[in-house]
Image (cartoon, rainbow, N blue to C red):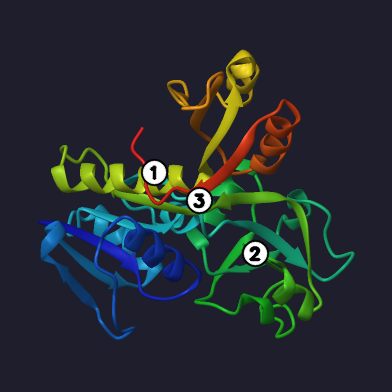
Amino acid sequence: MLRLAVPNKGALAEGAQTILKEAGYRPRRDSKELVVVDPDNSCELFFLRPKDIAVYVGEGTLDAGITGRDMLHDSGARVEEVLPLGFGRSTFRFAAPPDGFASVADLKGRRIATAYAGLLEGYLAEQGVDARVIKLDGAVETAIRLGVADAVADVVETGTTLRNMGLQVFGEPIARSEAVLIRPVGAAEDQGVGQLVRRLQGVLVARDYVMIDYDIRAERIEEAIALTPGMEGPTVSPLHREGWVAVRAMVPRKGHQQVMDQLWEIGAKAILVTAIYAARL
């Protein structure tokens, strides 16, 4: 039985539960549920603190987990990234009062507060900057005002919280993060993990593509196919009306309206776009 770790709260929780539900796994019915048994998929879902997930997976206690790439690197756990999941995107940045610092080099000998000490220490070592890292469990934005630090390093999504505290980001991003599927380093091939990966990949494809159907005169089919090549090629079927064919193909969701415009310009009719629930390519 697959044992999977899922974020129980925070920015990653909703996205993780949504993608798992779309992949056919049983959703959590109550936010207080810590374990969900899904016999139809031979799976147990354990709802844990996002920052703890890499540790549990790295120890081999669980087969796989969903967490943030920043938390994965911060943990130092023996886990590997299997699949990026496309949600929960953020950057890990330095911030300080305006005109305080311009680059990471300016932080030499200064105090930096963060909830991601492992990630920050590794970055400072790479940059050759000797600074004091002060580890806090959260709300690092207040550390400067309270005199605990000279700068902070924190996850930034919109930057609103930092601006509200009179801080602004500076320097290059320390890291870029998103939700990822992880498993223990060197883990043997597992049927449950393999099925999970295929299902998640199918959801990600479905989110990025739509299905387009249209009718076109046969003499313009090559122009139409150039606009909608599909994956292995579009499906082309003759219509009862002589000289016309029906075409079906997958096209990227982004820009599909422009494709519809271009098809219309070459004489396509009955152009329909429908969402894809899941896909296997």
Whole-percent x and y of residue 269? 63, 36
Mark nearer the N terminus (3 vs 2): 3
Give the mark, 2 or 1, whose residue is nearer the N terminus.
1
Screen quadrant of the C terminus: top left
Compared across the picture, whether 46 is left or right of 17 comes to left
Percent of width and height locating residue 165: 76, 80
> Which quadrant of the figure contains the N terminus?
bottom left
Q: Which mark is residue 157?
A: 2
Q: Nearer the viewer, mark 3 or mark 2?
A: 3
Element at badge 3?
A: loop
| Badge 3: residue crowd in 10 Å (few <14, some 14–19, many ≥20) | few
- Under mark 3, the amino acid is Gly
Point out residue 21 in the picture as x, y percentages from the top left corner.
33, 63
Q: Which residue is mark 1?
A: 83
User: Gap in Å between the C-alphas at discs 3 and 2?
Assistant: 14 Å
Q: Residue at x 85, y 65 (%)?
A: 100
Q: Is residue 67 left or right of residue 121?
A: left
Disc 2 element = loop
- Amino acid found under the numbered disc labelled 2: Glu
Residue 251: percent from left, percent from top? 55, 35
What amino acid is labelled 1 in the image? Answer: Leu
Nearest the viewer among 249 and 104 is 249
Label 2 to label 1, Cα distance in Å? 21 Å
User: Is disc 1 surrounded by few (<14), some (14 to 19) or many (20+) residues within 10 Å?
Assistant: some
Q: Which residue is mark 3?
A: 86
User: Residue placed farthest to the right in the image?
Assistant: 99
- Up the image or down, 274 lies above or below 62; here it is above
The residue located at (63%, 43%) in the rendering is: 254
Q: Is residue 137 left or right of residue 164?
A: left
Look at 59% across and 50% down and name the residue there: 176
Q: Residue at x 52, y 44 (%)?
A: 208
